[in-house]
Amino acid sequence: MNLNDEHLLRYSRHILLPDVGVAGQTRIAEAAVLVVGAGGLGCPVALYLGAAGVGRLCLADGDEIDLTNLQRQIGHATAAIGENKAESLARCVRAINPEITVQAIPRNLSGDALDRAIAGVDLVVDASDNFATRHAVNRACVVAQKPLVSGAAIGFSGQLAVFDPREPHSPCYHCLFPAEAGEPEMRCAESGVFAPLVGIIGSMQAMEALKLLAGAGEVQVGTLLLWDGLRSDMRRLNILRDPACPVCAQRPNQAG
């Protein structure tokens, strides 16, 4: 794809960055990204990826907007209450950047539909809010060899991790949170969530996704970033690949 004069102007602040430049912005413009979830995390992810010029953005969510969402889900307006979240967010992204393709998938992806959606993109951002979806997305990304940017936020605490099955030493989500461990599920409706927290974590997800697409900087593969909003403190933990992981141990590019 050749960037025209309007593109060069719109994305000029990216192009001025030596780590991005015209080549990096072109890679962003040629990329396709699937965002799973159009809620608290998915809104800032989609808005930043769209504004940054990701060529094709697919937004998947089967939920409808309700009044309690509007405290933090900044891609939805009060007038959109009752509307599907993916369709509402897609409209908001298009309003920011009509130059890109934005596809709303107004349902929760699973099974073959999830596999097909992931096979058709370059990168996946998991902005969902439950372990079942996260594990399903992770499995599909490992099979399709697609990088996955994962985030979570509850209360005042957030986390971010990047998994890239193309890298032989990269762990997967199951290595970090084994499905059989039965981790207790915490939901915003029961535990609450501080509004700016999802903006912080979602923006970080968008940053890692754009770095991956542009080939810029150091992507956080193999680390877990933990954000404590009450203390404004971040910790970084190394994640090791589990050689016995039932999801990623036998992936095609395993280093042996």
Image (tube, rainbow, N blue to C red):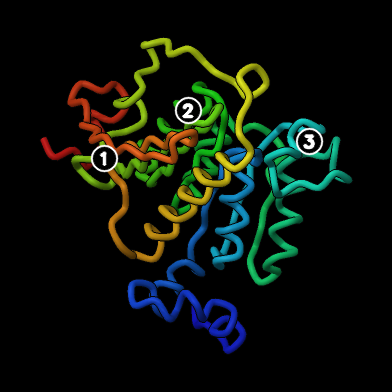
Asked if residue 199 lies left or right of residue 102, the reply is left
Instruction: Give the mark, 2 or 1, whose residue is nearer the N terminus.
Output: 2
* Circle 3 or circle 2, nearest the eye: 3
The answer to whether 50 appears left or right of 166 in the picture is: right
Reading the image, the residue beneath label 1 is: 222
The crowd level at tag 1 (other Cα within 10 Å; few <14, some 14-19, many 20+) is many
The residue shown at (54%, 32%) is: 112
Q: Which is closer to the viewer, label 2 or label 1?
A: 1
Q: Residue furthest left?
A: 256
Q: Which mark is residue 136?
A: 2
The residue type indicated by label 1 comes to Gly
Residue 143 x %, y %: 37, 36
**What residue appears at the point 45 percent right and 73 percent down from the top-left corner?**
25
Alpha-carbon distance for marks 3 and 1?
34 Å
Q: Identify residue for label 3.
A: 65
Q: Amino acid at mark 2?
A: Ala
Q: What separation in Å lies between label 3 and label 2 (alpha carbons)? A: 24 Å
Q: Please state the horizontal and vertical placement of residue 49, each as a whole percent of the image.
A: 55, 58
Horizontal side of 48 relative to 251 (left or right) equals right
State which quadrant residue 26 falls in: bottom left
- Front residue (pair 230, 67): 230
Q: Are marks 3 and 1 in contact (CB under 8 Å)?
A: no
